Image (cartoon, grey):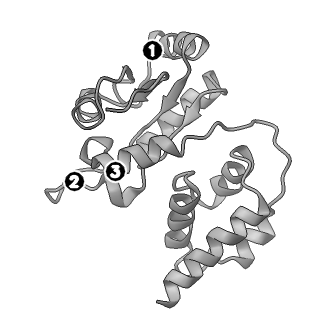
Amino acid sequence: MTEFKQIIVVEGRDDTKRLRALIGDVDTIETGGSAISKETLAKIKLAQATRGVIVLTDPDFQGQRIRNIIRAAVPEASHAFLPRADAVPAKSGGSLGVEHAQRAALLAALKAVATPEQNAPQQITRDDLAIAGLLGGPNARERRERLGDVLGIGYANGKQLLRRLQEFRVSPAAFADALQQINNEEKS
């Protein structure tokens, strides 16, 4: 089994159960959904100061909202992103969630953990995103989702993508390589 020094921040009990069933004895903090209490944020701050935290939320709007709240309160927290395709429930009609992921997907997300840097220099521009077909064009949403998966930074809408690329210090070379991979996949 894999051991994690850090405490993993998840949304709920089902996420904790899934992590423990597939990965082993991990310590978690459950946010209880997107209405994170001051007490929970205080726990996350303490955990970051003592052991470090990895934020692993559902790859949906509420999961992103939780990440934003935690990022504002604990900017040095690390983040792991589960691709949307790996969080789909077996039964139709359910919502995306960490609790639906397979072991390999969870381990890959936790292996690719990254810590945002608040004042990182901007190397990739909005024009670069537009030229790459990531803003306001046909398939732009799908291309952004795939880019987030390839780079391990999760899905971001057009407004968030530039900031996320900057925060996670994605180099122009890594950006170009990811785009090349996406373009090759689209040609196949």
Residue at position x 76%, y 57% in the image: 171
How far across and down, in percent of the image, does residue 98 sit? 32, 42
How far across and down, in percent of the image, does residue 134 sit? 63, 71
> Which residue position holds label 3?
104
Q: Residues within 10 Å of mark 3 (few under 14, many from 20)?
A: few
Nearer-N-terminus badge (3/2): 2
Which residue type carries mark 2? Pro
Q: Residues within 10 Å of mark 2 (few under 14, many from 20)?
A: some
Which residue type carries mark 3? Ala
> Which residue position holds label 2?
89
Nearer-N-terminus badge (3/1): 1
Residue 134 makes an appearance in the image: no
In the picture as drawn, the residue positioned furthest to the left comes out as 91
177 above or below 52?
below
> Which residue position holds label 1?
40
Residue at position x 46%, y 89% in the image: 188
Q: Residues within 10 Å of mark 1 (few under 14, many from 20)?
A: some
101 above or below 31?
below
Residue at position x 46%, y 9% in the image: 39
| Secondary element at tag 1 | helix
How far across and down, in percent of the image, does residue 26 sit? 35, 24
In which quadrant of the rendered view does residue 8 lie? top left
